[in-house]
Amino acid sequence: MAFPLRTPLRKTSGRTISAATATCLALGVAVWATLAYAAETQIFDPKTHKWVKYDRKKARSYYAAHKQVPEAFRMQVVPFKTAEKPGTIIIDGNQHFLYLVQPGFTAIRYGIGVGREGFGWAGIVRVGRTAEWPTWTPPAEMVARDPNAAKWASGQPGGPDNPLGARALYLYQGDQDTIYRIHGTPEPWTIGLDVSSGCIRMNNDDITDLHSRINVGAKVIVLMQGASLYKGV
Amino acid sequence: MNRSGIQLARGWFQLEANRNRMTTFAMALAAIQLAGCVSNQPAPGSVRNTGATAPADLQLACASAAAAPLGVDSSAVLPVSSSQVDEKTFQVVLEAKGARANCVVDTAGTVVSVQKV
């Protein structure tokens, strides 16, 4: 999803956020700037024997060559010692992992794409509702600047080209929609990258698997993305 | 062949045998070194993140441990920052309802200390 915001935008602290996001802030969702966070994802290049930046170009060429993302970003069961209940979702945007807590101190780990610089956020939310092959409606600002989005101003029907992909989990705080979602993507090579406007994207097989395993109401803990400058509540 | 000729031939064969042994030894050494290099090398397609934030489960261990000092339910405690202190420990900053705590946790998931700030 290129941009998750549906409501008119306004500027706050030098960054553009929506009225809905402001509501999120008021509700206690902490938004973080990542300005001073220099960490990056790297991939080992067996030809040069060096670690190189895993950026859009590298990710796309890797996916084209292997027809899948690097192994670390593929679904797998991992040890995960936590007191959180099975069924809880933990999102670690720094490492680009989403964990679904399982019994026996394990979790199913999926690769994710997360918010680009300045769009990271943290909070404790819940899955308010879910949808299969959801409709995507671009926000007004996006419609104004992007002709491709303009043609879907009244909503793009669900399907393989829809930015929300095969499934969407809508994240709520209390009864309020935070406007953030965990969703699929028609661009699976973007898993492992900082590309979104705050939504969490997964490849379609993974979001379909996650959707089949969770219940509406599931707790979602979004860990801080980036290391520094606190900007939120 | 006279006696000195036989000794000369013996010496040559011994030298040749030693050279072969040295070559074999050098090749074995090179193979060991190569194997060492290869085994230390990450697998193709390995990924890593250069940031030294605490693994998610360690951050959550700190969140649980910080609930009492912060006087809140553990479900309300959110890790908001983390960093690596040394090879075996991480520091995690936690927040709940405006209050903050610092937590130190080791790589085994044992909370070393929690302090309200």
Image (tube, rainbow, N blue to C red):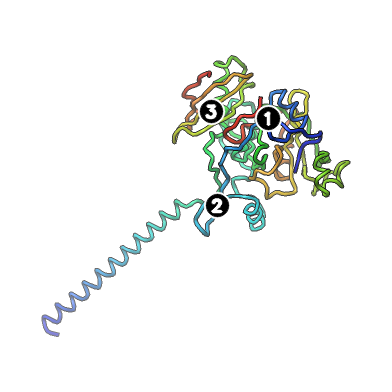
The residue indicated by pointer 3 is B92
Q: Which amino acid does label 2 sit on?
A: Val
Q: Which amino acid does label 1 sit on?
A: Val
| A155 lies left or right of A45 | right
Up-down: is A211 above or below A73? Answer: above
Query: From the viewer's perspective, is the residue at label 1 or at label 3 nearer?
Result: 3
The residue indicated by pointer 2 is A52
The residue indicated by pointer 1 is A220
Residue depicted at 85% across the width and 44% down the height: A156
Estimate the spatial distance between the alpha carbons at disc 3 and disc 2, rounded to whole Å. 28 Å
To the question of a shared chain for discs 3 and 2, the answer is no
Quick one: label 2 or label 1, which is nearer the N terminus?
2
Q: Can residue B102 be seen in this view?
A: yes
The quadrant the N terminus of chain A occupies is: top right
Residue depicted at 59% across the width and 14% down the height: B71
Would you say the residues marked 2 and 1 are in contact, meaning their CB atoms lie under 8 Å apart? Answer: no
Residue depicted at 77% across the width and 40% down the height: A167
Q: Mark 2 lies on which chain?
A: A
Q: What residue type is labelled 3?
A: Val
Up-down: is A41 above or below A120? Answer: below
Numbered marks: total: 3
